[in-house]
């Protein structure tokens, strides 16, 4: 474990003292995609919450503004400095996850939020970012093409600690986001095929144990409803049924902004958070969906290009970890709203309402850009 604690930041060179000297070379597609997605999210959140007691647009606009400030801040900090601080951030994340189990507010059956008056903070988002940095630091210090079993077990343990605390809340969706983080980084670090097969068998065993002993009744109902939506169309199957109606009714060009019947007449639950993609599909149709998915693809392409251009192992691992989580969020949420996957609380990046999640997305984007910006100096 000594490689986790060894400082990574060497003395700054004259070129590194001017981190914005190569700003024109940063991948602009990723920045444009993030800002356009946030703009689409603002408009859709306003439409989705217009019939609620509170219009969430002003709050979401505030989160977007603060997120952009965090993006600038993350770009300004050398990611190797963040890696040096990753142990402290990781431990802080674990402490916050433990405290929320005692002091947190219960929302949707899960004790996963700190509430400060009208403001809320979800520590699992901070822990996700801190864990990415800490695992990247650990794996980047291993100078060999294929990881040993002990090294894989260490990485799994580092990810399992925050995951287990989030499962206790219980927030299965939040805990699931740590899996693509771990898998993506391990694949880049190097894993033997037999270890992957063993991991698949262990995952199947753990899934069975989770179903039997770890999941609450309402969570098992969600899975069964996914398999058989017609078994309870007015109960646990209501969400996915209304979501599929909203998506299908949008047809080619949609019903128009703020003209969706499922959202405006309040048939669609959680329309400004988990099901915001259904609102978008109803109002803008297939054309709107393709446009937004194209922006997500542009973001992912930009992140992949940054990973391929990164000049050191730690930079590649950070980008892959963050991008894996982003991709999983997009894939799961969009599949969930059309009934391809069970419903769980996994929001859509930059579009779903949520302060902590929005700040996480902008901060992660800033770190990606920071890795890209410093590809000329981290040699």
Image (cartoon, grey):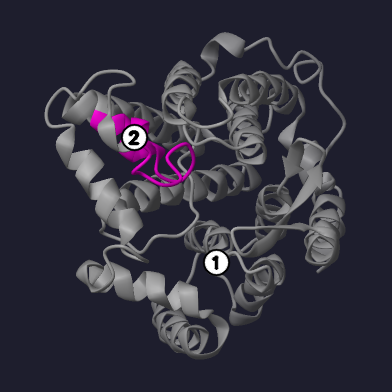
**Residue 38 colored magenta?**
no
Please tell me which residue is depicted at 42% across the width and 21% down the height of the picture: 40
Q: Picture quarter containing residue 198?
A: bottom left
Crowding at dot 2, Cα within 10 Å, few <14 / some 14-19 / many 20+, comes out as few
For label 1, the residue is: 172
Q: In which quadrant of the rendered image does the N terminus lie?
A: bottom right
Q: Magenta stretch: give its range.
A: 263-282
Q: Is 150 in front, or is 56?
A: 56
Q: Is residue 24 left or right of residue 164?
A: left
Of pointers 1 and 2, the one earlier in the residue sequence:
1
Q: In which quadrant of the rendered image does the C terminus lie?
A: top right
The disc placed on residue 265 is 2
Q: Is residue 53 left or right of residue 111?
A: left
Q: Does 238 appear above or below 14?
A: below
Q: Is residue 190 left or right of residue 301?
A: right
Q: Which is in the foreground here, disc 1 or disc 2?
A: 2
Q: Is 194 in front, or is 202?
A: 202
Residue 81 image position (x, y, % from top left)? 81, 38
Q: Picture quarter containing residue 293?
A: top left
Residue 184 image position (x, y, % from top left)? 49, 57
Q: Secondary structure at mark 2?
A: loop
Q: Is 189 in front, or is 267?
A: 267
Q: Secondary structure at mark 1?
A: helix
Can residue 298 be seen here? yes
């Amino acid at each position: 474990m000594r490689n986790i604690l060894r400082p990574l930041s060497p003395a700054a060179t004259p070129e590194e003292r001017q981190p914005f000297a190569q700003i024109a070379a940063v991948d602009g597609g990723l920045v444009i995609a993030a800002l356009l997605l946030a703009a689409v999210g603002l408009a859709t959140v306003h439409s989705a919450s217009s019939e609620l007691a509170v219009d969430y647009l002003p709050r979401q606009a505030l989160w977007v503004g603060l997120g952009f400030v965090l993006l600038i801040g993350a770009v300004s900090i050398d990611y190797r400095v963040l890696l040096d601080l990753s142990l402290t951030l990781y431990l802080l994340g674990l402490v916050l996850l433990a405290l929320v189990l005692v002091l947190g507010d219960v929302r949707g059956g899960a004790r996963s939020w700190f509430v400060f008056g009208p403001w809320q903070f979800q520590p699992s988002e901070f822990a996700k970012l801190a864990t990415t940095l800490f695992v990247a630091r650990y794996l980047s210090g291993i100078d060999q093409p294929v990881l040993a079993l002990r090294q894989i077990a260490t990485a799994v343990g580092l990810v399992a600690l925050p995951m287990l605390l989030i499962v206790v809340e219980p927030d299965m969706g939040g805990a699931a986001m740590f899996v693509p983080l771990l898998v993506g980084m391990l694949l880049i670090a190097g894993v033997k095929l037999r270890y992957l097969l063993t991991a698949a068998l262990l995952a199947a065993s753990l899934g069975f144990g989770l179903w039997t002993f770890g999941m609450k009744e309402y969570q098992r109902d969600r899975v069964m409803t996914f398999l058989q939506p017609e078994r309870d169309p007015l109960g646990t199957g209501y969400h996915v049924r209304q979501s599929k109606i909203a998506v299908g009714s949008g047809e080619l060009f949609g019903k128009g902004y703020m003209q969706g019947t499922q959202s405006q007449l309040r048939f669609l639950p959680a329309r400004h958070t988990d099901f915001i993609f259904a609102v978008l599909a109803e109002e803008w149709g297939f054309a709107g969906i393709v446009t937004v998915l194209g922006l997500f693809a542009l973001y992912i392409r930009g992140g992949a290009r940054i990973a391929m251009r990164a000049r050191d192992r730690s930079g590649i691992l950070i980008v892959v970890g963050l991008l894996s989580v982003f991709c999983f969020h997009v894939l799961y949420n969009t599949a969930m709203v059309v009934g391809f996957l069970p419903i769980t609380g996994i929001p859509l990046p930059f579009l779903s309402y949520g302060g902590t999640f929005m700040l996480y997305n902008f901060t992660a984007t800033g770190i990606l850009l920071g890795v890209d910006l410093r590809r000329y100096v981290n040699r």
